[in-house]
Each structure stands twice: as structure tokens, then as C-alpha cells.
Amino acid sequence: MDKFKQNPLVKKLGFNRVVLIGVLILLYVVFCVTIKNFWGLSHIMSIFNYVYFLGFLSLGVTFVIATGGIDFSIGPVMFACALVAGNFFSKYGLPMGVCLVISVLVGFVFGMFNGYMVAYQDIPPFIISMASMNIAKGAASIFTQSIQQTFPQGDAPGGWFRNLARFNGIPTGLIIFAIVAGACAIILNNTKAGRYILCLGSNKEAVRLSGVNTKKWQMLAYVICGILVGCAAIFFVACYTTVQPNYGDQYNNEAIAGCVMGGTSMAGGLASISGTVIGVLIISLVQEGILALKLTKDYQLIITGIIVIAAVYADVVARRRKN
């Protein structure tokens, strides 16, 4: 094992990432062997559809967890963004482009609210995110009168936005997601904001005593998360058309699972955007495999829960060895 870890390629990519890539390939091979035509285009595109919105959620919560915080509101907030945007389009007749901007703005507002309450009012992240989850569900239901929102198909007026996910058979959503993930990696690893966000998770008090405005950078992590949640809503409706009120809870665990599985520590101070991307791919692959096996959604919930426990346990063991 030590010899494998010392391999130049493994050292460059990182041992954890190599293991994750191996798990991803192994799962795909197993599904291809056990499920007829799983390697076909329909299944691959279905996996990508799930990757798009779940990927944006996971990227956003990576910044929050890096500070040592948590956000359990991202799923319901994503649905709130989609419901509000859909209502503005169907009821008020606003152009689709404006509605997509509104989706991002709704996510931004929730990010600002969560960040302000955590950073400036010292409310525990767990409490404020649970409160925001309920606020998002209630506010979206009231605004839409508990009516589901259906977005137009590609050939209908306003349906052009579906090209963001797929254009003439090309998975444009994957390209956009890769660009955004790359930008997030640069922000987290190569900018002052990213360094401070990671330092907050390592030792917030030491950062504060060094003269850094910790509140500002902590709030920024939640704002980035909110914006990416608004973007996730756009890709969700671009792939799945209909949005129901009072949904979205399940995506919290999946997004956090993808994030933590990828190497982001729940204790904060350590995060990996590339690891998050691989984690999201694994979660999406498992989801599609379960559906292809004609198993109920309950099995996916069980598997996701096991993945979360395994990822957090691995993080705890790694920190224990380091200490």
C-alpha cells in the first residue's frame, strides 16, 4: 500500500481521489454487467441530468462545510428558487431569462440570510439552516399557492433554457458544470477568500486574533452556496420540468454525501472541489443504477445514508491518525 501511495501519479492526483475514481469505475462496471444496456446513451444522459443540479448543490455546500459549518436548507431552497421562478413565468408572464435570474437571486437572498445569522448573530449553523429549510418550504408554497410549477418544453416559448442542459444531443450542462467547478477550485485554492474560508474551519479564533474580519469571509461562504443553489434550480427544471412544493429534503443528504465523500472534512479546514465532483458522480451513478434495477427510492436513501456514515467515519479516522 505504501508503495502504491508513493507512485508519482498517485501522489499527484492524491490517494483519496485515486480511490474514489477506482470506486466510480468499479460501480459502473458492476452496473453494466448486471443491468442490460446500462452503458447506453439514455442511462448516461440520465446520470448527467442528476449530476448537474446535485453538483451545484455539492459545490455550494463545500464552501460552507469548509468553514466548519453546515447547511441543511439547500434542497428546499433549490425548490423554492425553481417554484418562484416558475410562478413568475407562468402567472406573471416574465421572460424566461428574467425568471432564471430571479432563481439565482432567491438563492442569493437565502445565502445572505444564513450567512448573516451565522456570522454576525452567532446562531449555530445547524439551527439556522433548519429554520431556513422551513422558511423556504413555507414561503414557496404561499407564493405559488401550493401549486406545482411546470416549465416549458424546448419547442415552446421560453423553452430555450433547456439548451443549458442539452443542445442537439451535446451535454452542454456537463460543460457548464465543469467550468463552474473549475472556478470554484480556483476560488478555494488560489484566492485570499478561499484561504480564509479554509482557515476559518481550521482555527477561527487564531484567524480572528490575526486581524482578519472572520465574519465577512464566513458570510461569503454561505453567499456563494446560495448562488450555486439558485443555479442548481435552473438545471433541475431544465432536466425534470415539474417542481412540487414542500420537496427537496432528500437532496441535502446527497449533496453533503458527495461533498464529504470527496474529501471535505465535516470539521472544516479541508476541502476538495475535484473530490466533490467525483463524489457527485458516484452518488448520481448509484441513483441511476437503483432506478435501472427497478428498486424503490427507499434503497437509494439507505445507500446514501451508508455512504454518509462511511465518509464521515473515514474523515474521523484520518483526523485521529493525523493527531
Image (cartoon, grey):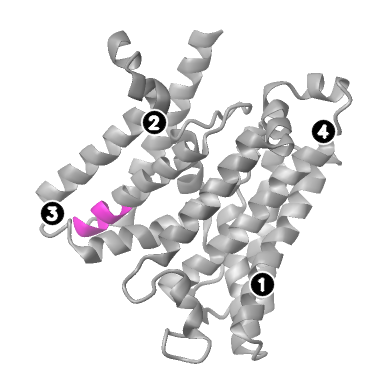
- Quadrant where the N terminus sits is top left
Q: Nearer the viewer, residue 300 or 287?
A: 287
Task: Give, as a three-letter code, the residue at label 4.
Answer: Thr
Tag shown at residue 17: 2
Quarter that holds the C terminus: top right
Dot 3 alpha-carbon crowd within 10 angstroms: few under 14, some 14 to 19, many 20 or more? few
Closest to the camera, between mark 1 and mark 3, is 1
Foreground tag (4 vs 3)? 4
View extreme (front): residue? 8
From the viewer's perspective, tell me whether residue 7 is left or right of residue 126.
left
Picture quarter containing residue 174? Answer: bottom left
Stretch of the chain drawn in magenta: 287-293
Q: Residues within 10 Å of mark 1 (few under 14, many from 20)?
A: some
Q: Which amino acid, mark 2? A: Arg
Q: Which residue is mark 3?
A: 35
Label 4 – label 1 distance at C-alpha: 29 Å
Mark 2 and mark 1 residues within 8 Å of each other at the beta carbon: no
Which residue, given by chain and number where applicable, does mark 1 sit on? 101
Identify the amino acid type marked 1. Val
Chain-order first, disc 4 or disc 1: 1
Task: Compare residues 239 and 314 and report the one nearer the observer.
Answer: 239
On screen, 126 above or below 320? below
CA distance separating discs 1 and 3: 40 Å
